[in-house]
Image (spheres, coloured by chain):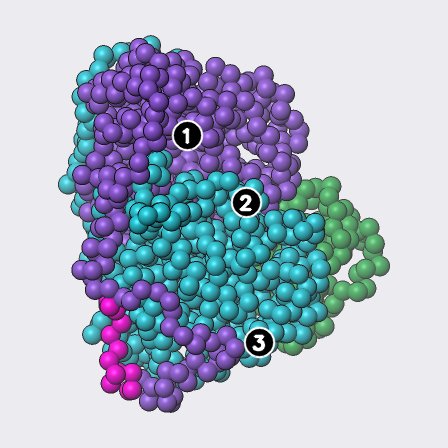
Chain colours: A green, B cyan, C purple
Amino acid sequence: MADESYPEGLRYHPEHDWARIDGDEATFGVTWYAQDALGEVVFYEPPEVGSETTKDQAYAEVESVKAVSDVYAPLSGEITAVNDAVSDSPEVVNEDPYGEGWLVRVKLTNPSEVDELLDVAAYRKLLEDE
Amino acid sequence: MTSGTALSPPSNADTPTAQQRERATTIFERSVAGRRAGSVPKTDVPERSLADLIPANLRRERPPQLPEVSEPEIVRHYNRLSRRNFDLDTGPYPLGSCTMKHNPRLNERVAALPGHARLHPAQSPKRAQGALDLMWRLERSLSEICGLPHVSLQPSAGSHGELAGLLLTRAYHEDRGEERTRVLTPDTSHGTNPASVTMAGYEVVKVATDERGGVDLDDLRSKIDESVACLMLTNPNTLGVFDENITEIARVVHASGATLYYDGANLNAIMGRSRPGDMGFDIVHVNLHKSFSQPHGGGGPGAGPIAVSDRIEPYLPVPRIVRSEGGNGASPAYDFDYAQPKSIGRLRGFAGNFGVFVRSYAYIRSLGGDGLTEASETAVLNANYLLAKLREGRAGRYLPVAFDRTCMHEFVLSGAPAKRELGVKTLDVAKRLLDFGFHPPTIYFPLLVDEALMVEPTETETREALDALAEAFDEILAEAESDPEIARKAPYTTPVRRLDEASASRHPVVRQAL
Amino acid sequence: MTRYTSATDSDRQAMLDAIGAGSIEELFDQVPAEVRLDRALDLPDGLTETECFDHLAGLAARNAHADAEVCFLGAGMYDHYVPAIVDAITQRSEFLTPYTPYQPEVSQGGLQVMFEFQTAISELTALPVSNASLYEGPSSVASAAYLAIGATKGRRKLVVSRGVHPHSRETLRTYAKGFGADVVEVGLDGGVTDAAELAEAVDTDTAAVFVQNPNFLGAVEDLEALAAVAKEAGALTVAAVDPLTLGVLRPPGESGVDIALGEGQSMGGRLDFGGPSFGFFAATEEHLRRMPGRIAGETTDADGRRGFVLALQTREQHIRREKATHNICTSQALNALGGVIYLAWLGRQGIVDLGELMARRTAYARERLAGVEGVELLHEAPVVREFAVRLDAPVDEVLDRVAEDGIAAGYPLAREYPEYEDGLLVAITERRSREDIDRLADSLGAAIGASRTHTVQKAPIPEEVAS
């Protein structure tokens, strides 16, 4: 399993999801905290390419042996790519939550939402209070 | 003594036990072509060709690959397999909310009587009067124990009873021209409750628990309105405490027109002391495999009869059992009645798990009212005693009780301090208990309590068994104080060690490859 | 009175001291006065084991059971021979007394049994995934409807053939109220599902089509043709099948069926006046994650040993709660154990032999009965182990007369099939010999004759009917 980390270049959502912004596109995934709470991930069914994500709403579920967790969209957008590798090997979410464990890529429909996300410091603070 | 102390694991960790050395082999893998156990009588009628009787496109071409083994092989296979199970007859099994009480063998004997076991369900009721009489008496007994007048024995398990209760609720409201869409359940409820709610077409709304462990009355009042069809509760609840506000809860629920449902999983705490009908419940299900001694069978069979109030009675499933008094000194006669125009209909085939009724009826007749009351009193005594013994040891510090009140027949501990201070989780404590010859309590339920352990000893455990269980917990925690790795890698002495559940769910293999 | 507790007065005192309570009463202080029961339970006093046995034996003696008469009753449950090893193994403490395998390390016996059972059901039905049991046949049909509604993303119509067991159809209607679904029935033609009527009824709002094979009247259905109708509309096909006919009938998995399920009692189960038995449930791979019930999966332990665990628990109520695929918790594990032992005992060749024997005896019985004055076949579709006739005399009276000859002749159809009010369903197993069948034919003939020519008084209710 990966060591606990919260990379600098990402933005964070209070429901333990991250976003990597790239112009008018973004990649989403779940944070180290989320995968640690979940335990070994065993199942992920990606949403369809072309469907929409809405900020603060769940766009998928991730399952471990003993738990199911909603995955929340940090931002609104149209899904342009899904990570099928995670469906085949769900454990990659535990091993590399920020890299190979990415879940979806979207074209942002409301880029100003980025400002509402937390930076690393704010997210770490949220975790401390948890 | 009911169980031994564990072997100290580190030195034995690399020496497998005999059972551990034995590779799990399925009955299919033991097949050798041509072997067989049973045989079928020779044809004594004209040996017509199957081709004449069944068209080719409807016939099977290749026989199913069932095992090919002799009788001694079957017996040996399942015997050896049985020994890879821990069971209640072998040692304490304090699984919270399951009521693992002793299964009397008399009940097996009477269930096997041909008049019960060899009776076809489609036999004319006129010629099955003993069966209908038994069911009638069981209904009356459950009615008295629950404090509600009308009973159906039909549901096959507790969750089946829950579904029945919710469908009865639906029928009741619809009959009054009301459309209600939501059902309230506490956040401590057993998973079957919300699952049943969805199957019955309602939306689940959670009600919070207060700091005493009971329903948060303010939260209830804020959520109950005319869209609510029902509140589902158990009392005592899954935290093992009796909700002292039950009368007020019932009043609030009834004032809004909703029904009040009782999950009978915890009935073992209150038989002869209090009755759900008297608390104001409209619908109660009873788990015959819990309070009424039906063996658990590794996961059933059980039964979940329901008892209901007058206002719910018209909707009960069919068939109902009816009794007509014999005139002129003749005995009463029993029959099945299907003419119930408001009934919700059937929930299953025939009349229910009759074999389970026989066993539970025998249990009730064996104990009588006083015996049932004593069973509940002893269940509560045993739980409080076990809790007291645990608190005397290290569990008082590392596995404190979640709600500091006198418990009823079960209690919930929190393993949060053990996790924090010793680095040992509830899961690890449970796995280490296996090495000590005990089945662990229920773990990680209710969800409200962090690192929960739900402990229900039942009334049939002896004082010595409870002492041994408390000592085992203390020893495990002492071990963890000096070396937490011991529990984290447990169990060591069971037929298999900790299993990889993740890969079983990632890449499921659910049958033997043939 | 019998008790299973051990606490003596001195035990109780010591325990109360440890607790710090003065009396057991004190422990019940938390029960408010207004809900305390202030009298003894109004139940008969407890009995000793001897007395209890005698009482239960007295009740049993008032039932006409299948050892005391020749039983041609079927309708989903059958008088098959249960081999002695089934009782010997299922009565073992290690199988009888534990609960669901929540701690797999000490439940490998139960989990491997489930795995073997799942394998056997998959083999019988030719469908790759099976669960470890449901309650019985009819409620399994309702469970399949729940799956189909979820799988077809909320289609709400359930089309069911009148050939499906009446208890299954009724149960489906009961559950459908909760599902918000409508149940539409399709009739029979020549004893089998009316294919044209089916095609009319199935549309793009249909979640599933339900058929039974052999159907309730004993007729063999063309599952492939019926499944094709469903498939075309994007609906699932659910087939309730009779497991002991699967030695000779084409399995549902080879006929385009999505879900095969049914009543398991005939596999090593007692008659037990209708329960406990078990329901089996198998499906195509794509429905695995929507399956109801427990599923055992294979895995390895920390040292690499082969073992078994409850797999895919995230489907189930204890994790998924309101979004679970089903609400089932306790199912019928011990009965399923009886089932897999029975199938191992019968074996690969035995199930074929049994199917052939039943088919031949049923053909013989049908012919003999058709030759009886006042008996006519209700349909002439192919049958395997059960068939339906019509009687030219009041069925209930005829049955009473035949019962006096020590025979339970069959299941009257009138209540559930008013269109066949003179109908009778006759079931054959390996226990019904040619002699039994000949006796039935003779007794039926005599009873019909007597009923037609005499005014009949209602048969009195017997006090004791068993020998």
Chain letter of the residue beneath label 1 in the structure image? C
Position of the N terminus of chain C, as image quadrant, is bottom left
Q: Residues within 10 Å of mark 2 (few under 14, many from 20)?
A: many
Q: Is residue B121 magenta?
A: no
Residue type at mark 1?
Val
Q: Which residue is mark 3?
A: B245
Q: Which mark is residue B343?
A: 2
Percent x, y of residue B338: 48, 40
* Residue visible at 38% across and 69% down in the picture: C41
Q: Nearer the viewer, mark 3 or mark 1?
A: 3
Q: Position of residue B115 (x, y in %)?
A: 25, 43
The answer to whether A18 appears left or right of C169 in the picture is: right
> Disc 2: which chain?
B
Q: CA distance from mark 1 to mark 2?
A: 28 Å
State which mark lies toward you, 3 or 2: 2
Helix, strand or loop at label 3? It is: loop
Instruction: Have a look at marks 3 and 1 and say if they share a chain.
Output: no
The segment highlighted magenta reads C1-14
Q: Nearer the viewer, residue C33 or C333?
A: C33
Quarter holding the C terminus of chain C is top left
Q: Along the horizontal axis of the image, is A130 left or right of C365? A: right
* Residue shown at the point (51%, 57%) measured from the top left: B308
- Name the residue at the front extreme: B328
Residue that badge 1 annotates: C241
Foreground of the two, A59 or C416: C416
- Mark 2: which amino acid? Ser
Question: Marks 3 and 2, how far apart in space?
Answer: 33 Å
Q: Name the mark nearer the viewer: 1 or 2.
A: 2
Q: Which residue is painted at 51% across and 37% down in the image? A: C170
